[in-house]
Structure formats: C-alpha cells, structure tokens
Amino acid sequence: MLDTSDIGPGDCPQMKKLITQEYRSDSLDDYGPKLKILPTNNQVRELQTILRDRNTSRSDFKFYADRLIRLVIEESLNQLPFTKCVITTPTGAKYNGLKYERGNCGVSIVRSGEAMEQGLRDCCRSIRIGKILVESDADTHEARVVYARFPEDIASRKVLLMYPIMSTGNTVIKAVAVLREHNVAEENIILSNLFSTPFAAKAVIQAYPQMTILTSELHHIAPNHFGQKYFGTD
C-alpha cells in the first residue's frame, strides 16, 4: 500500500482512500489521445529516480528537478501550434521552416508550479506567466481558488498550465475551472506535469476531456515531497 502521509492539502479522506487502492496495469489507450507521456529513456528514468530518492540532497534535488522540468516544458511546447515560414539565411538561401503561432502564455499553480516557471522562460524568453493559488478548506478539505492573476487577453491565448505533482487531480481541476471562467477554451490548455498518479490523470481527463496533459510518468506513488524539497521547506 501507499504511504499517504505526504498527500497534500485538498485531498479529502475519501480521496486518500481511493489513491491508496492498487491499480491494474492500464494501457495508455484507456486514457485517450489527450494524455501524452514524455518519451522515456535512461536519462529521464535516472532523473525520476533521483527525485524519488529520499537520500537526495536538496541541492541535487533542485538541479535534477530543473533538468526534468526543462525536458517536460520542451515537450509541452511541441503540443503548441506551429505555422510554416520561409526565411533567408546569411548566404542568401531560402529555408522552409516553422514558427510558433502568436498568443501563448504560461500559468503556474502556486506554489510548486512556480518551480517550472524558469524552465518556461528559458525556452520562451518573453512569455507572459500568470498564477493561480489553490488552498484547502480547513473544515471541509475542499480545494478552493483564493487568487488568480492572468494576462488580460488570456481568453485568446494557448495556455501552458504548470503543476509538477498530481495525486488526486483536485487542484488542477479547480485551476482549470478558473481558466474556463476567464473564457479560455478547454482545447487551448496544456497541462505540464512531472509526476501523476493514474487516478489523478483519469480524474482530470474525465473533467476536461479536450485538455492536453503532458507528464513524464504515470505511477501510483507520487513524490508529494516535491514542493517542500525544491524550495527547501521540508
């Protein structure tokens, strides 16, 4: 069974019970075409192993987390629309290339999602980034949005929603609801995620079947210590 001691706020007891159930080996086909998995190789597997190892120091954790974040962000950017273009090289030759369509932005779910902001800025130097803060009600354990700040024209943009760890999917579902309230089309949202449980992935897909999810790994144990370790608050 799973160790549920580090399941985060917003995860009610009923959710914890569901999370701790044993999962059968699902096929990716069971999740539909909107779930994307980062192509796995030995490098990615090593990064995942280091981040899950309780003996990893905080400095090493942050270094290797930033590496995995960069890989996930770059693969997330591959989900954005491109248009064909023709440019002229320094030798005067023509080159048939690609460029991003205009109107992309990032939104991080505070606080752990902020760990992914620099990785996005490293890839897109002038991209605008909004924030959403989701907290747990002390009495009901329900996740609720307490703060949101977006670019004014977010309804016309493609949105990279950044949140590294999904155990139940509750926080992401609440965050996407706020984006939808700001008239962001569901199909214009791409979730950039490092680790997700099968339960969380299915919950988000069921709630928002047109949204794209990009994660590095589906596993029934999520490294819920990520935010505390990354920011040095563990």
Image (cartoon, rainbow, N blue to C red):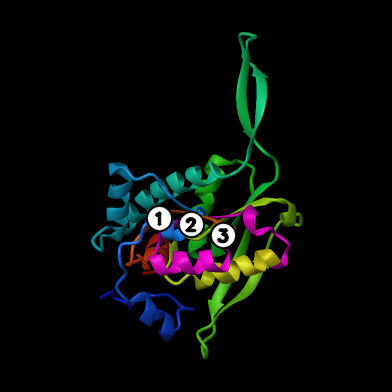
Residues in magenta, as a range:
181-208
Between residue 23 and residue 144, name the one nearer to us.
23
Question: Residue at the location (28% across, 58% down)?
Answer: 57
Amino acid residing under circle 1: Leu
Residue 196, position in %: x, y? Answer: 41, 62
Q: Residues within 10 Å of mark 2 (few under 14, many from 20)?
A: few
Looking at the rendered image, the disc whose residue lies closer to the viewer, 3 or 2, is 2
Q: Which residue is mark 1?
A: 28
Residue at disc 2, secondary structure: loop
Q: Amino acid at mark 3?
A: Ser
| Secondary structure of residue under mark 1 | helix
Q: Measure the C-alpha gap from mark 3 to mark 2.
A: 25 Å
Q: Residue furthest left?
A: 55
Within the image, what quadrant is residue 50 found in?
bottom left
Q: Nearer the observer, disc 1 or disc 3? A: 1
Numbered mark located on residue 32 in the image: 2
Query: At which x and y percent is residue 217?
Result: 37, 55
- Residue 142, x across and y down, in percent: 53, 82
C-alpha distance separating marks 1 and 3: 26 Å
Lower position in the chain sequence, tag 1 or tag 3: 1
